[in-house]
Amino acid sequence: MKLKNTLCILLILIMLISLGACGKTTAPRATALPNTAAETQTEYRLTAKLTPADTESKSLAAHFTETAVISFTNTSSDVWKRICLRDYAASNLELENDMGGEYTPGSIREVLDSAGNTLKFEAQKDKSVVYVTLSSPLRPGERTTVTVDYSTEIPCGGERLCWYPSGDYGSKSVTCLSQAYPMLAEYVDGKWNETPYFDDGECFFSRCASFEMTLSVPEGCTVVSTGSETQNSDGTWTLKADKVRDFAVIVGESFEKLTARVGDVTVNSYYNSAADGDKKQGEISLKTAVDAVNAFEEAWGKYPYDTLDVVQAPYNSGGMEYPGMVRISDSYAGSLELVEGEVGKMLRLDVAHEVAHEWFYAAVGNDQYREAWLDESFAVYGEYVYQLYTGESESDVRERVMAFDGVLPQKYIDLSAGEYFDEGTGYGDYIHAVYKVGPQFLWKLRQAMGADSFDDFMHTWYTEHMFKEVTTADFREAIEKAAPGGEVRALLSEYLSPA
């Protein structure tokens, strides 16, 4: 009887302890997964709302709110006690403040783990770098999820993240949501990627991920995004993309669309419906994109997605690339030289350049800050491929290439953006290196190897590295294997920093 009483007391204590534990939120248990590409791919599930700006005042901001559920795997050999999220919207607003804006950078409001516990986070001096302390260490091969409450202002202007008036008399707007979500930074060689944000070139680096966004926008808006777009019965939009390095959305209140097919690829050209110049830009963009896809599939390999969207939108530079979508500045539409003049040629080359990035950046990835030449120089080289495909002579293209010979003395093309910076000239050497000298290096390799052999090399380089990331060391190894001759080795020594 005494033993029976003792057992009853123990059972009651165990039940009380269990009930007490039910009242607490415990740290989540991470899931261990094998390191296959499909299972380790980061997943973003985004629920967002865009509130457009009042177009009567350019001083007012649009607003974007979002709940981001991010699932990720520790693919390193280190234990992660914290992770790094990149808040590029914050850096975008800091640039606007440098030009007289009055915005509050910092889009991340709260971070929760998968059990609902609040996680501590802290933005660094560079506000795009945000460290989040995990509730329990994440070991190699384990997978977990965090939920981020995210909100940002969107300034009027022509930066990556912006809105601008469109339509008749500027009564409507176009809003560009570039990198408008908390992005998990890359963990390389034992540390998180903290490369600074800058707008004189590219500064992003991310492996392929999958995205699904449910987006609320005002009635009558057209939504264009990385991936597919479906409007639901309740007026919201579902946007989906897989195997993409980042995710962008452009929302327009006055978009029209032109469409063509290249094999099994749908090419769309979106333009503002306000003026004849806008439609003409849309027509030229569509024709150029079709020619570029044909040219690059012939030279390098199959286009990596089902759809290519070319979108006329506000932007201070000529264009900007995203997976499956390119953004082309609407400034071309106002030029009288749009069709036959120099401006028309610039538009065509800009479109071809950005479309080339679908092969080099979207499919074959690289660290765009540390080794920008691996996508930007390749995209300019793509302009040469497009020119030859559309009937320009070899001699005319060669003349354009060699016009930049010797513009970057005593500098290599494969340095990081920061290594090119000069207090007097800013990022001038960077621009020369990756947009002028790097393409010249590729053209000279083509001359040294012969056009057919170099085309074969480029095709192999693309197909073998599709949806992977490459480095200059990878390129050097591959080209030396494909062309072991002395002329190619001399070019490598001239243009690339010592191995």
Image (spheres, grey):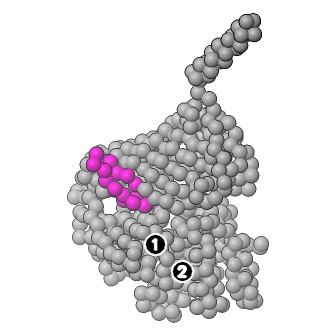
Above or below, comparing residue 307 to residue 395 in the picture: above
The Cα atoms of the two marked residues, 1 and 2, are separated by 13 Å
Which region of the structure is painted magenta?
A: 224-239
Q: Does the segment drawn in magenta span residue 458?
A: no
Q: Residue furthest top?
A: 2
User: Which residue is at a point 66% across and 47% down the rendered structure image?
Assistant: 32
| Relative image position of residue 49 (x, y in whole percent) | 37, 44
Residue 353 seen in this snapshot: no
Q: Which residue is rendered at x = 62% and y = 89% of the image?
A: 453
Residue 115 shows in the view? yes
228 left or right of 127? left
Q: Check disc 1: other Cα within 10 Å, few if <14, some if 14-19, many if 20+.
A: many
Nearest the eye: 468 or 176: 468
Residue that sits furthest to the front in the current view? 1
Direction right: furthest residue: 499
Q: Which residue is mark 1?
A: 355
Would you say 381 lies left or right of 278 here?
A: right
Secondary structure of the residue carrying tag 1 is: helix
Query: In this figure, which residue is indicated by the disc labeled 2?
Result: 300
Report the front residue among 158 and 390: 390
Q: Is residue 62 left or right of residue 480?
A: left
Amino acid type of the residue tagged 2 in the rendering: Trp
Q: Secondary structure at mark 2?
A: loop
**Rendering coords of residue 472 (x, y %):** 68, 71
* Vertical placement of residue 440 versus 474, above or below: below
Q: Position of residue 141 (x, y in %)?
A: 68, 50
**Count of numbered circles in the view:** 2
